[in-house]
Image (cartoon, helix red, strand yellow):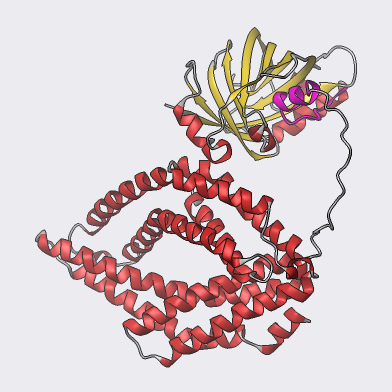
Amino acid sequence: MAETKREIERKYEATGGDVRLPDLTKVADVASVVDKGVAELDAVYYDTQDLRLAADSLTLRRRTGGDDAGWHLKFPVATGIRDEIHAPLSPDVPRTLAALLRSRVRDTPLTPVVRLLSSRHVRHLLDEEGTLLAEVSVDAVRAERLGPGVPGATAAWTEVEVELADDVDPALLDRVEKRLRKAGLRPSHSASKLARALAETAPDVPDLPEPTPARPLNEHTAGGHVLGYLRAQRDALVGLDPAVRRDLPDSVHQMRVATRRLRSAFKSYGKVLDRTVTDPVGEELKWLAGELGVDRDQEVLTERLQSRIAALPRPLLLGPVRGRLRIWSVARRSGSRRKTIAVLDSKRYLALLDTLDALLDAPPLRPAARRPVAEVVPKAVLKDYERLAGRIAHALELGPGAPRDLAMHDARKAAKRARYAAEAAKPALGAPAKKFAKRMKAVQTVLGDHQDSVVAREALRGLAIQAHLAGESAFTWGLLHGQEAATAADRERELPEVWRKASRPQLRKRLSA
């Protein structure tokens, strides 16, 4: 079983000569420094031969020695902060860790790339009560490059590492750093030992003649702009895969958003990229978003119903309402989560990632791709707006009922596409695109809450039937159903005014100015 730990640390190196630690008891809150002796560590780092993990600042190692021997996989969270996932020692990469890397490595084998031998002298910084505040280690490191066809280059250095203990104010690191700087130490230029080892043992590459460059497709062209946006969404999709597998908060939603933004951009910017090529990819993205939606939609629906129940006075809670909702939610959630992981492990999903990479490496550009952003992008955004306007008009023509619910759902999807198109345009068009996207989001929010109410009413009807068949009162479920119907009616009344603000002519004029 893998365990996760949040690691907050800083690394330092000497500007010259031996590393000498200053008296750290002079740091505020540090009452004593306890020498914990020297540990000999032997770590082998794994990666693909083209170093995909290192490119994303991920590290996977198998380490012996010390008190945390085993496999360690580290994901960057912020500067100096990483999530370290630990698994017991085994000959091969543990399946739990390999799964977290699948979106990056696909079917490419993970092999040893660097071996680090470290002689680690550890000291503990304690407060007056003897509680651990931080661990300071002086590491004498020897690195050796591994791998077929790679010369066994070596490097050696000494560094200081300060790791914060759990639940300690990070401000302590600033105070420790101040003392270390006065002693001649400086923050390390490398984010990790592996990064330094790779840099200092890199094989020499002979200089090759520069190929004749093609006409550049920079960020000022429509193609350069759109491709930059698509690559960012592809990277988000790949990066969120392990977060979904770890069941981190909001990860499924964010991954689903990335798939939708990709698909939406393919449609919105059909003048830039050939849709005969991108449409099939878009269909696969639609499949993925739908599969992820099983998990995410259940999460949103459960939270909505829980908040409804929490707002009711106790006399109106007739029967085991909370218990029935919990059983219903857990049953649906556990099944949907298993399905989500199965999707991420499927060949179809990995093929989609490969297809996205290939498409972005050799994009099917159309002639408009080389035109300036200002000539192409605003027209694409306004085209999506016109599509939305038609759907809003159709929805407002209908009376309350199922046809109107469906029309408002279609309008919601169009509002989302117009919003995504405007958000993609923000780096190039600035404030007008930002304001336009904000208005589209307001329309999407009203329509989205309406659709959530439609889905909630269907769920409440099912829960009422289950309660009735179990001999329980269905009163509360019927009451909640009525509340959701009232919410839907409120959103229908709000829509005309929200749309009036979003469809002001000056918004569109500023976008295309």
Q: Position of residue 47 (x, y in %)?
A: 62, 27
Numbered disc total: 0
User: Residue at left 47%, top 47%?
Assistant: 349
Residue range highlighted in magenta: 184-202
User: Residue at left 43%, top 43%?
Assistant: 346
User: Residue at left 33%, top 74%?
Assistant: 484
Residue 57: quarter of image? top right
The N terminus, quarter of image: top left
Q: Is residue 237 visible?
A: no
Q: Position of residue 54 (x, y in %)?
A: 67, 32
Closer to us: 59 or 114? 114
Q: Position of residue 300 (x, y in %)?
A: 41, 60
Q: Is residue 97 above or below residue 472?
A: above
Residue 188 shown in magenta: yes
Q: Is residue 34 above or below residue 2?
A: above
Residue 258 relative to residue 23: left or right: left
Q: Is residue 303 above or below residue 249?
A: below
User: Residue at left 31%, top 63%?
Assistant: 309
Q: Position of residue 26 (x, y in %)?
A: 78, 22
Residue 76 shown in magenta: no
Q: Is residue 139 above or below residue 285?
A: above
